Amino acid sequence: MPAQRRVYAISGGVTKFAKAHPEMDFRLMVKRAYDYAMKDVPKLKQSEIESSRISYFSDHFARQLKAASMVQDYLGLNPKDSRRIEWGGATGGQAIQAGWEAIASGRNDVCLVAGFETMSHVETWKGNEFIALASDTNFDYPVGGFYTGYYALMVQRHIYEYLRKSKFASMKDERKAQKAATEEAKRIMAMVSVKNHINAIYNPYAQYPEKLTMKRALGGEMIAWPLNRPSVCAMSDGAAVMVLASEDVAFRYTDRPVLIKGVGCGTDTMRLADRPHGHVPLFPWETAEYYSKLEYPGVHSFRAGRTAALEAYKNAGITDPINELDFVELHDAYASSEIQTYEDIGLCRYGEGYDFVDQGHPFLEGVDYGLDLPHKGTIPVNPSGGLIACGHPVGATGIMQGVFAFWQLQGSIGKHFGSDRLQIKNAKRGLIHSHAGTGSSVTVTIMEGL
Amino acid sequence: MAELKKFNKFREVMREIQKSGAAVYRNPVGTNDLVILSPYNIKYVHSYAEDSPFFLALAKGKLLGSECTKCHHKYATPRSHCMECGSETKWFDLPLEGRVHSWTTCYFGSEEFLKETPFNLALVEFDGVDTLLLSRLDGVKQEGVYIGMKVKAEFRKKPRYLISDVHFVPLVEKKVSGKQGK
């Protein structure tokens, strides 16, 4: 890899994610998050910020073109370099990587990454329509465009590939076997919903903290079979910012910066119908033989997520993620995609995601979930509560993950959350994962504390 | 859930605005927020361009796929250039019968389709074709659908020149249960 400068996160800020913030427009939301971040690094003067990367997903939600320029303007950052970043659901993750590039390339020493979304401007069903316009409008949208429906199609096939064909392989009656496999998947997806909602109880920024029980998680209103309300993220208003700096200057502003150790990015077809059937891009610890019968990625797995993880691990020198990472903040827009993502990023092999949850690996050690979890705390996933419980103001979401990971690695969760319940002890390295469009666009970023 | 209660108050104001065009929202945080209705209606002139033959065929009760002229990758959802090798594709007739590759039943959705819920979506696979086609699966309820189910295409009599001019129905299994069929 060519020479590049080391890039650090030095500060962050998040507004509380909410169903609506009618008292703040998008500019003021970003300003609040920005002021919080600036207060945390008092030695940094605004004049030292050389550029900005500002992200929001949808012009339909914003109802204001050039909204990123209005943020730049409101923060008083003119006449400096700035640009808007948009990459669907992965907008925030991509904005962090764009900020990383501005510094790694040597162009800037300090770059502000800021993102927002204002989804409350329309009713939820209109919002679903706006989001569905991020699917092929010739072939996908007019069929009944609805993203939860698309993800339901994906998890149905995932269940078929990995539960029907393994745990339920001995059942002869095809329909009964598929139904049994789906019930099992629903139970495990409910465990993910329980985990993320309960984690969020200790996160003051989260939109839907809840002492969720399995009964309620399983009994929620059906949205698109087998995904029910507790397993789907909500629409939100919110903003998040991160300040990135080069190694040359980072230590001037804080004695606890966090290194952005490796970035990775992957893509796939926009239409699910086009997803190819080929071979799994392998991690070093996997073998082709193990996957010899698997047609990949099909519609059951996210090849873009696997590609992004491969690149990020290579750049960060990670060869054993389960032992080298201390936590993961991943894009759980659906409980199903959280499970699919464990496999993409190599926390387990393809097909082992359901068991990974059932055994308790992604749960936090010090939190009571009311579940029997033999291997709790192996690698906490979404300790913040994830998208399911924090909310998903698209352009802010990936940056929110970055800020939470930054605080985890600084060891400053207690300071910023008002409780250190979610602080992972001695967390050294974390992974953030941002994801868009049925897995058409994914970023993975590895962050490392001092 | 406090969050939802707060939002429900705001939603009341949103409803009032639908009638009056403007309202002041007495925000629990202490501000008085003036909220107005801001309509946005557009009719786009949209050309199907290189996909046009597919939609013209659809109106005549035919499904067209595309096959790469070089590597012979076969697409059920057409594209005029191959994503495997970049070469041009040619049109071919897709079979009108296939199987459910994956499926779901939507109970909620986008505003445009909300009144049609619940409806089934299916990715349909065809023998000898490398990719899939997304379609509605009608004539069967959630309990009756499964992966591998045989389905056949049906076409709208009066075409609207949308992909929804085609939908699929179960091929043979209408007798299986009294619950099935709308």
Image (cartoon, grey):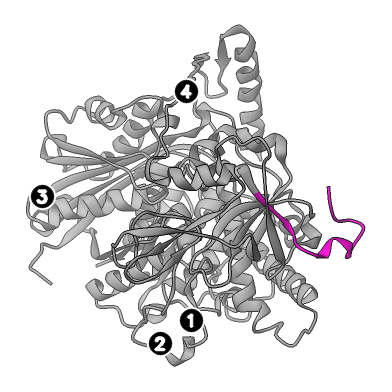
Label 2: how many Cα within 10 Å (few below 14, some 14–19, many 20+): some
Magenta residues span: B167-182
- Are discs 3 and 4 located on one and the same chain? no
| Horizontal relation, residue A291 to residue A246: left or right | right
* Residue designated by label 3: A109
Quarter containing the C terminus of chain A? bottom left
* Residue designated by label 2: A286
Q: CA distance from mark 4 to mark 2?
A: 52 Å
Q: Amino acid at mark 3?
A: Asp
Q: Amino acid at mark 2?
A: Glu
Mark nearer the viewer, 3 or 1: 1
Q: Is residue A14 visible?
A: yes
Label 4: how many Cα within 10 Å (few below 14, some 14–19, many 20+): few
Q: Amino acid at mark 4?
A: Lys
Q: Position of residue A230 (x, y in %)?
A: 66, 52
| Horizontal relation, residue A169 to residue A234: left or right | right
Of all residues, the one furthest to the bottom in this rendering is A289
* Residue designated by label 1: A349
Question: Which mark, residue B43?
Answer: 4
Please tell me how many numbered marks the rendered image carries.
4
Of all residues, the one furthest to the top in this rendering is B20
Q: CA distance from mark 4 to mark 1?
A: 48 Å
